[in-house]
Amino acid sequence: MSTRAFQHDAQVLRREQLSSHLVRLELAVDGFESTGVPDEWVGLVVPDQFQSRYYTVRSHGAGRLVLDVVVHEHGLVTEWAARDVVGDRVTVTEPKGSFAPPPAAQWLLLVGDLTAMPAMARIVEETGLPTRVWAEVPDDLPHYLPARADVTWLVPPGEGRSALAAAVEGIEWPAGEGYFWMAGESAQMRAIRKHLMRERRLPSSAYDVMGYWRGGAARQPRAVDPGPVWRASPDDPGPARQRPGDHPARDQS
Ligand SMILES: Cc1cc2nc3c(=O)[nH]c(=O)nc-3n(C[C@H](O)[C@H](O)[C@H](O)COP(=O)(O)OP(=O)(O)OC[C@H]3O[C@@H](n4cnc5c(N)ncnc54)[C@H](O)[C@@H]3O)c2cc1C
């Protein structure tokens, strides 16, 4: 079977700026079949590029696919999505999913940064289990997660940085069998996998921890640097949320 069979041509129908760093894209796509797994993702190839980047399927139906794209400092998709992309033709790959709670799970803990928000929103929408969420986001997104979610909002320690590992070490774990799902910056995810294996001694079936992006080494900005891509968007006021120093455990970043 050719690789082509695993790809769909799509067109951007609508672009909506949800917040300073988050853009919603609605795509028209033929023949897309969901896996039914709520954290499913597709590879996205934007015009004049051949490399793909992964994006969660926030929602889908009747030839439509919705992706919520983080607009960060610089990057292949981020720079494309920051522009008026309506009408652009893109390619999406077949979806894959990973979220797989054990049948006996009585609760869910979800932890993630802005890139994980689409998956966490869809998981909360689709699960019947009591769910707690820790969301580390730079923008105020009070209505992004379904109202039934019990959410702790955290502020990232800086642009393109995350302190989620420290936050997780301070979580009070519920009793009984459950499922822990987490996604975000890769170094934070590696630290958490160690914590879950060594401190919590969880079997691998009890959690799913995925590195969604790789943080680079911080560089001092220079006066000649262009501003970050996301700053071209209208600013939103900072929310009243937990600050990094308020993380329940030591900041490891
Ligand atoms: C399974 C899966 C699902 C994902 N779902 C989503 C989703 O729904 N929405 C979403 O926005 N992202 C999602 N991601 C993350 C996304 O694929 C990466 O952030 C990707 O690198 C962005 O591509 P880019 O072309 O914008 O930047 P790149 O060209 O890949 O990277 C350019 C530079 O930016 C840095 N960078 C990359 N991402 C970020 C970031 N988020 N914040 C700060 N710096 C960054 C890189 O380290 C690099 O230095 C998902 C990833 C995976 C693996």
Image (tube, rainbow, N blue to C red):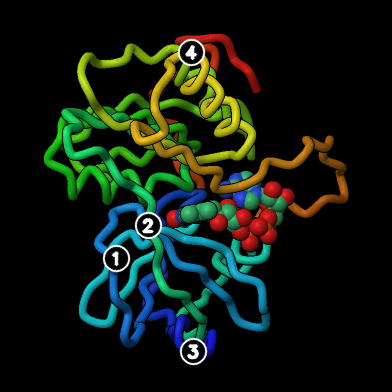
Res 199 label = 4
Identify residue type, mark 4. Answer: Glu
User: Whole-percent x and y of residue 37?
Assistant: 28, 57
The answer to whether 216 appears left or right of 105 in the picture is: right
Residue located 47% across and 82% down the image: 7
As rendered, which of 130 and 5 lies closer to the eye? 5
- Label 1: element kind: loop
Quarter location, residue 59? bottom left
As rendered, which of 169 and 208 lies closer to the eye? 208
Identify residue type, mark 2. Answer: Gly
Query: Is residue 232 visible to us here?
Result: no
Identify residue type, mark 1. Answer: Thr
The answer to whether 76 appears left or right of 195 in the picture is: right
Residue located 58% across and 64% down the image: 53
Quarter location, residue 171? top left
Q: According to the image, label 1 marks what residue?
A: 35
As measured in the structure, the alpha-carbon distance from the residue carrying label 2 to the one carrying label 3 is 22 Å
As measured in the structure, the alpha-carbon distance from the residue carrying label 1 to the one carrying label 2 is 7 Å
Res 27 label = none
User: Whole-percent x and y of residue 115?
Assistant: 48, 47
Res 1 label = 3
- Marked residue nearer the N-terminal end (1 or 3): 3
Identify residue type, mark 3. Answer: Met
> Mark 4 and mark 3 in contact (Cβ < 8 Å)?
no
